[in-house]
Image (tube, rainbow, N blue to C red):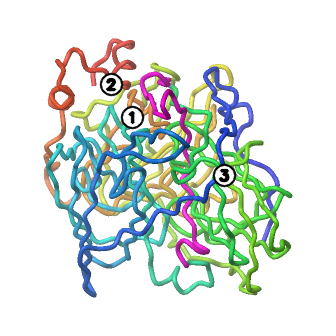
Amino acid sequence: MKLILTIFFDEAAFNTHDGGYVPLEVYDAPEVPLAIPPLLEPDQETATDAYYTVEAQAGETQILPGAKTKTWGYNASLLGKTIVYHVGKHNHVTLKNSLPELTTFHWHGLGVSGPYIDGGCHAPVYPGEESKIEFTLHQPAATTWLHAHPCPSTAEQVWHGLATMVIVKDEHEESLPLPRNYGVDDIPLVLQDRRFHENNQWDYREDYDPDGVQGPTALINGTVNPYFDVTTQKLRLRILDGANRREWRLHFSDNLEFTQIAGDSSLLPEPVKFTKLMLTCAERAEIIVDFKDYKEGDVVTLFSDDVPIVRFRIHDFTPDNTVVPDKLIDLPKEEADPDLPVRAILMSGMDEEVMLNGKKFNMQRIDATQPVGKAQYWDITNSNDMVGGMVHPFHVHGTEFLVISRNGHEPYANEHGYKDTVGVNPGETVRILVRFAQTGVYMYHCHIIEHEDGGMMAQIQSYDPAEKELKKYKLMDMDTLMNAFAEERGIKTEELWMAGMESYEKMGMEM
């Protein structure tokens, strides 16, 4: 197993070079136990079916000493309970909205039909109402997540706290000698950042930046200055970059080596050993950390850049001689359909000027089509060259893809499994192989969330080639959306402030 000692992404494009960069700082507050989100229990379960209720709700959370912070979450006051789905089981999910405004429930990383089950902007659930969806997953085990996606208010709702981890399990992953005792040796880490204003409150509008909202305080599973009590020799950390903008450049004290076993949408074919790891927005990584050389009383710290974000307090543990297999998964060989041309996608601009292929997102416009079951090359180019440019994380809804090359060269060492989000450096073209298994309308976009709200997004319709005409879907329109938000907030539509709309207005465009 090769040891990788460096971060791959272009250093000149790290977010540390942004004009609006907000460096992390250690908040002056006591260390507290890392919050471990409880598992969401099914309402009912049989051998073939599982029934869940996922409720978006407002609440207050004790994050810092003093006043509680007003937050949103899923089945919780902040973030949410972790949802576990099993491949092959039929899931019935009631989506309940107890918020004061409309929201959507986007299953980021799940191979479900679009646009309604996928939960982008075309699947609103209004306050006090609920929607019922059902699906069966046929995809590899993975760490995925659920977040709000009501364009152009996705960023603000995620900032309020609407993001939670979703774990997909299958028989193959469960056969491997990997930690999987949730909350003990299998630990979720949702990495976010916030700025605390008066009385410990968040103020999205005050902090707004069209290139992505950041805060100086790391928030890990909704916890500030967390520690975790280690009682096993090995930990499996399921890490999600759930931030609106921030990249996380991770490493442990003592340059402790760790092993990455999975990326966004599957196990890696072969594990990779690192001392440093960078995640762009919405990317996930599963890593195994072995504390065999530490003793009770030691503390191992996880850093982002040079700022501590989680401290692991070592307790007595039983020796663990299990070995991560050299081969984790065999992914099927896929080839691009020779009859499908390479799809070229250009991500351009920064601030309010962000676009895809020279256009801003329009909810009523289908930008591309692709037949189901056929794989197609997509070439994703980042044209940014302003002040070194920035890394744009590119995400496709409703599918998992393979990273084929970066500027014609091999992908990064941890990009050989299935992914749904890939960071693209300035001046770089990343080729991915995309195949949709189900018909529907799906979004693809930059996952700096303010960029997608600002129009760096498009949508594709996957279709059955045996059908003579494209299926017509009822798509959300901007007037309906804006009128609904205004009515829910008790103001006139012309008084409505939604961050993403500033990008359209300053460019003289309409969504």
Which segment did they paint magenta? 181-210
Quadrant containing the N terminus is bottom right
Asked if marks 1 and 2 touch (Cβ < 8 Å), the reply is: yes
Q: Amino acid at mark 3?
A: Glu
Q: Which residue is mark 3?
A: 31
Residue 254 horizontal/vertical position (percent): 86, 58
Residue under the point 69% across and 27% down = 17
Q: Which residue is mark 1?
A: 156
Residue under the point 18% across and 32% down = 488
Instruction: Identify the mark nearer the N-term, 1 or 2.
Output: 1
Asked if marks 1 and 3 touch (Cβ < 8 Å), the reply is: no
- Return the residue nearer the eye: 477 or 24: 24
- Could you tell me how far apart the alpha carbons at marks 2 and 3 are, in whole angstroms? 36 Å
Q: Amino acid at mark 2?
A: Met
Instruction: Identify the mark nearer the N-term, 2 or 3.
Output: 3
Residue 282 horizontal/vertical position (percent): 51, 48
Q: Is residue 21 left or right of residue 365?
A: right
Residue 154, magenta (yes or no): no
Where 53 sits versus 98, above or below? below
Q: Is residue 27 left or right of residue 367?
A: right
- Return the residue nearer the eye: 29 or 411: 29
Q: Which residue is mark 2?
A: 498
**Residue 62 visible in the displayed image:** yes
Residue 329 horizontal/vertical position (percent): 57, 76
